[in-house]
Amino acid sequence: MTVMGTPRLRKEDPKLLTGENKFVDDIHVPGELWMGMVRSPMAHARVTSVDTSVAAGMDGVHAVYTGAELNDMGLWAAPLPCAWPVTDDMVNPPHYPVAAEEVHHVGEIVAVVLADTRYGAVDAAEVVEVEYEPLPVVPSIAAARDGDAVAHSDLDSNKAYHWPLIPDPDALEAAFASATHTIKAEFEQQRLIPAAMEPRGVLAVPSPAGGDVTLYSATQVPHILKVMIAATTGLSESKLRIVAPAVGGGFGAKLNVNPDELLSVTLANKLGRAIRWTETRSEAAFSTHQGRGQLQTIELAADGDGKLTGVRVHLDADMGAYMMLITPGVPLLGSFLYTGVYDVPAFGFTCDGYFTNLTPTDAYRGAGRPEASYAIERAMDLLANEVGVGPDEIRRRNYLAGGGHFENLETASTLVFDSGHYSPNLDAALELSGYDQLRAEQAKRRADGDTKHLGIGLCTYVEICGLAPSRALGGLNYGAGGWEHATVRFLPTGKVEVVSGSTPHGQGHETAWSMIVADKLGVDPDDVTVLHSDTAISPLGLDTYGSRSLSVGGVAIAVACDKVIDKAREIAAHQLEANPDDLDFEAGTFAVKGSPDKTMPIQAVAFGAFTAHDLPDGMEPNLQEQVTWDPPNFAFPFGSHVAVVEVDEETGGVELLDYTAIDDCGNQVNPLIVEGQVHGGIVQGVAQALWEGASYDADGNCRNPSLLDYLVPSAAEVPNMKLGSTTTPSTSNPLGVKGVGEAGTIGSAAAVINAVCDALSPMGITDMPMPASPATVWNAIQQAKNNNENGGGQ
Amino acid sequence: MQVEVTVNGQAKSADVEPRTLLVHFLRDELGLTGTNVGCDTSSCGACTVHIGGESVKSCTVLAVQARGEDITTIEGMASDGVLHPMQQAFMECHGLQCGYCTPGMVMAATSLLSENPSPTEADVREGLEGNLCRCTGYHNIVKAVLQASGGQS
Ligand code: FES
Ligand code: FES
């Protein structure tokens, strides 16, 4: 029986389709109090007074706390955590759940109310009177780097850290000194609001006798949260239980440790009442971290054939107001990928992190890697123009071919890619997209003087996922490991229970894990139950982010299954009176080689292990095994995307006409889920290219916090997508799997902007800022026309 | 104020503040938590229900305005443990991932088909414009709605 690799409908769906699943805001307990946040309207100010008296006197209001009062209550053992101090001298201003003296971004919490009802909490928060003394605001990375204002008044600079990765500085210098062609380009990765459709929310429930707290949180990381809540509140880990119930999407936005989580736990513990809070969508622009926020400079050096000889990159990265859990590390997650899938002899990367008075940044789908892919893939198109070859040809000339082998590919950034075979992948994408016909159509439109310009954009991305080998993380100063835990146990009746430390929020783990177990153990996937997302049931785990679930958590399950089979083999051999080595195990049944009538299904072995009446001497009863899998290397999925756009010269409007993606995520478990991940990822990257961007005024106010103004695309804005795949198994794990959660996002923004620039290249346009809104594109066209006229008149 | 409605064929009533939104009435008072809230600007459609057979964003209506109405929520779509054909199509086409937008999508899609039983792909995309999904990229949602309509998928 082979289940892996076949499309299979999801077990998760019926409950989600009927509304039976419980998200955090669906769960209620008696006596619960609603938390309401009083948020700063100023980006940088001293808090001079907080008057809570009116709010405290309102009907149904249980308590109101200022930041100073909460500090005095001794609730905090430490500030909010940053687990990734990227350098020893990184600046990390203390960040408490509620500001007491100075606020550093709009929306920072200055007081908290507790009320009997959802609406009552909002009413009370509105009448808390806070006075502020404004301080100079740092509203952008450029202002942080070049301006006089400092985002934290007790710091004398906005610079948080400088991080270099220059394996061979002399070689890099030499590459640029001797280059025939050089390219230098600057790109802005605008801030993005993650906008998972389920807003974040919490419900903290104290035990009636006190001392223990259960936190239900819309989180991707219940296990990490548990450790961090213990560390920041001083509550014992053994008194905390964290449950991620149904979680409505994450995309990185739900992997943090947030003020609301700490407040609800500590106040519930103190008051003996359940405390709840759900962010509103407009509040989420302040209460949940944002993504991206980088100024990139990339330089390429190449020889006369366009063969790369060096790549040099510098980033200025926007931390926002504070270091959240992995804020400083996000840009560095991309550092290793600025050479893309190319054979680059010399490489250098530096990053400066800066504080601004904006919502903190942290991981958002791809986290550092879409930025890297964007920069190198945009720059490769510029190099193609410079050398005078097509975008496909420039890529082919530079692909890592590993001297004709496609495994263990060494790169200039010091990483070794597990496997990659790029040319056939690009061929497949060009073919499926109808590339030659598209170019012919483009030529025809150009010859006809059509004002609707066709643009075709390519991108061959590589992603680094399967986070992560614990030693590698240690080398990067990250504060935890990268392993994942799994338990696989047979129940007495022959059903299988899997406990996974990996925590889903839409990825379909229950279905995928069941398929892995079904193949390994020869059982029906419907006979496998997957338990997860509750630290009382799954005490060990490192959760879900960085496309790690399958290549770390799924592999842990597969290896645990192997151990189950090993033990079952001993028992079966004992009971069949054979040597363990003489047993075959196939389709769930042990059979003695050469004696086809001597067989034992694994379910019978499991029952025997349960009764323990007749086990080999010294063997423990029951059939269950645990594995903590620490991957030996990352996994490096890759793929080629082709975007086709139509740009209207008269309006600046960009329409995405067609999209093709050939992704290679190694062996696939469930192609249905793989395609779904790619679809969603592509649209998130397209959205960065064309529509989305958190926009701030000079005072640090977000101009578009709500879904009215922040343009998350609907079905009407995007086309159907044409997907395919190639399969280059990973060498980093025994399943040969890689990961696919972020792939679409990593490939698509570059492909779309390459297409827009391709459409407008006859006008001399070579770059387009994101999001390429009609106004932005129209302005670029007007400027190009003016330049061309002026140029023509000389 | 007392609000009496019929929800999924059953008479229901509760005493609520006049300002209570229908979506909060359904969720917090009646315990019908299948209908979700994804925004505060009537933009996302996660809260879509049927009132008198027509799809309505239940965050745009006060509970008192729905007095006496016949309301269907996602909990009323499957019967006797059998999924509604639209729910079944979403499942078969992998039209959901996290499932948070899904109840609203299913309600909007069934109402779309009752107005236009044989939509084109473009009709479906236009018709679902008021419902946002962050996970699926819409490809499989559109496929599901076309499949449920008996059209090409
Ligand atoms: S919650 Fe009603 S439209 Fe978003
Ligand atoms: S399935 Fe997650 S928002 Fe649509």
Image (tube, coloured by chain):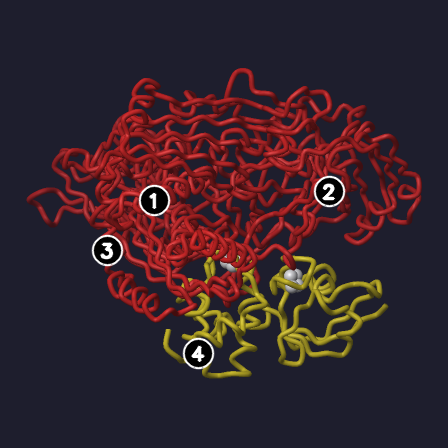
Q: Are marks 3 and 1 in contact (CB under 8 Å)?
A: no
Residue where numbered disc 4 is placed? B120
Q: In the rendered structure, which amino acid carries the disc numbered 1?
A: Tyr
Chain seen in red: A
Q: Secondary structure at mark 3?
A: helix
Question: Share a chain, discs 3 and 2?
Answer: yes
Residue where numbered disc 2 is placed? A274
Q: Nearer the viewer, mark 4 or mark 1?
A: 1
Question: Share a chain, discs 3 and 4?
Answer: no
Report the chain holding disc 3: A
Q: In the rendered structure, which amino acid carries the disc numbered 4?
A: Thr
> Of residues A618 and A68, which is closer to you in this image?
A68
- Left or right placement of residue A420 versus residue A368 in this view: left
CA gap, disc 2 and disc 4: 49 Å
Q: Which residue in the rendered view is the most extreme toward the front?
A: A794
CA gap, disc 3 and disc 1: 14 Å
Local packing at callout 3 (Cα closer than 10 Å; few below 14, some 14-19, many 20+) is many
Report the chain holding disc 4: B
Q: Earlier in the sequence, mark 3 or mark 2?
A: 2
CA gap, disc 4 and disc 1: 34 Å
- Left or right placement of residue A762 versus residue A437 in this view: right
Residue where numbered disc 1 is placed? A461
Q: Earlier in the sequence, mark 3 or mark 1?
A: 3
Question: Share a chain, discs 4 and 1?
Answer: no
Instruction: Name the residue at 62% across, 68% down.
Output: B48
Q: Are marks 3 and 4 in contact (CB under 8 Å)?
A: no
Q: Secondary structure at mark 2?
A: loop
Report the chain holding disc 2: A
Chain seen in yellow: B
Residue where numbered disc 3 is placed? A428
Q: Quadrant of the N terminus of chain A?
A: bottom left
Instruction: Name the residue at 50% across, 51% down.
Output: A688
